[in-house]
Image (cartoon, rainbow, N blue to C red):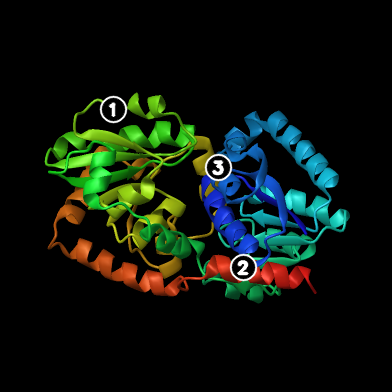
Amino acid sequence: MKLFIISGEASGDLHGSNLVKELLLQKPNIEIKGWGGDLMEKAGVNILKHYRELAFMGFWEVITNIRTISKNFKLCKEQIVDFKPDAIIFIDYPGFNLRMADFCKEHNIPTLYYISPQVWAWKQSRVKKIKKVVDQMYVILPFEKPFYENLGYNVTFVGHPLIDAIEQFRKVALTKEAFLSKHQLNGDKKIIALLPGSRKQEISVKLPIMLSVVEQYPDYQFIIAGAPSQDETFYRSFITNENVDLVMGDTYNLLNNAYAGLVTSGTATLETALFKVPQVVCYKGNALSYHIAKRIIKVKYISLVNLIEDKEVVKELIQNELTKENIDKELKHLLDEEHSKRKKMLSDYNQLIEDCGGVGASQKTASLVLEYLQK
C-alpha cells in the first residue's frame, strides 16, 4: 500500500507524525511519501517538500507570494502522479489541500481528510466542495460533527490528537531539575512561557509586545518557546533583558514547567490548556489581512480553548487590544495563586479535556483509514 500525505504547518506535522506512527504499527509495509516536516520524516514519511517553504499567512501575504504558490501546486501534482498512491491523506491546510483534493478526485485517487478546514469559522460555502472532493473526513473538535451533519455531510469525530501527543510526551518528560539544567535556566524563579508562533512574520509582530512587560516582573523568568523551523539567532535578536531566555524545540517541557503563559492564537492555546497552564491569548496580524478577516469570520473567539467550550475561558487580546498595559493587567491575575481568574481557568481546563474526547485519536483515525482502503 502507498499513501501520500500533505501537511503545511507545524501543528499538522505533529498530528501527521502521530497518525503515521499508528498506520505503520497497524500495517508496517505501507510506503508513505508527502509534504510535511521533521516529525513526519522521523515517523517514516519520505518528505518531498518541507512545510517551512509553504507558510504564507493572511490575504496580503498570499497575494505577494502567488507565483511561488502556483509552482508548489504544479510540483505536488507531478509528485502524486509519479508516485501513484492508493490514497491521499490531507491534514488541515485547506487553501492548498482542497485544491489538491479536487485534482486527486479527477485522477480517481481516494481522498481522506484528517483535521477539518475551519469552515465553521468562515467560507461555509466550502462544505459543498468538501462533499464533492473528500471521500472521508475525520474531525477533531466536538462541535464539528453536528456542524457538518446540519449541512448534510456525515463525518467522524475521532477526538483531539493533542491529547495523544501530550500523553506520549509525559512518558519521556524531563524532571524540572533536568529541564533547567539542560537549558541552563535559573531554578529560583517561576517560569512565564512565551509562545509567539512558528512563522517569522507573526513572531516579529507579537514577540516584542509580549516582551514589553518583562521589566514589570523581576521575580519571574520569561522563556521563549523557539520553533524548530526558525533560527536561534532570530529569536535572540529580540532579547534585551536578563530575565528572558530561549528554549529551542522543547515547548512541551517548557509548558510542563511553566506557571503561566502568553500564547499566540491557534493550536498553542489548546496545548497550553492541556498542560493546565493559565494563559493570555495574544494575536496581532497584518492590518489589512485582519480587517478583511474580521468582516468574514463568523466565530466569537479566536482561541481553540474558547471555541470548544463556547465561552471565554481564556482572555483574548486581539489586534489593538494587544498592548503592554492589557497584558500586564491580565498576567497579574494569573500569577496570583488565590485569584479567582486563575482558579476558574484551571477548573474550566478540566472540562475542556473531557470534551476533547480523551486519548486514542491517532489510533482510531489510522484504523478508520485502513478499514476504508481495504473495503
Q: Which residue is mark 1?
A: 239
Frontmost residue, 185 versus 197 = 185
Where residue 9 sits in the image (x, y, percent)? Answer: 56, 45
Q: Which mark is residue 365?
A: 2
- Identify which amino acid the numbered label 3 is placed on: Asp
Q: CA distance from mark 1 to mark 3?
A: 27 Å
Q: Is residue 57 above or below residue 136?
A: above
- Identify which amino acid the numbered label 1 is placed on: Ile
SS assignment at label 2: helix
Q: Which of pointers 1 and 3 indicates the residue nearer the eye?
A: 3
Q: Is residue 17 above or below residue 9?
A: below
Q: Which of pointers 3 and 2 indicates the residue nearer the eye?
A: 3
Q: Quadrant of residue 153?
A: bottom right
Question: Which one is earlier in the sequence, the residue at label 3 or at label 2?
Answer: 3
Quarter of the figure that contains the C terminus: bottom right
- Identify which amino acid the numbered label 2 is placed on: Thr
Residue 224 left/right relative to 328:
right
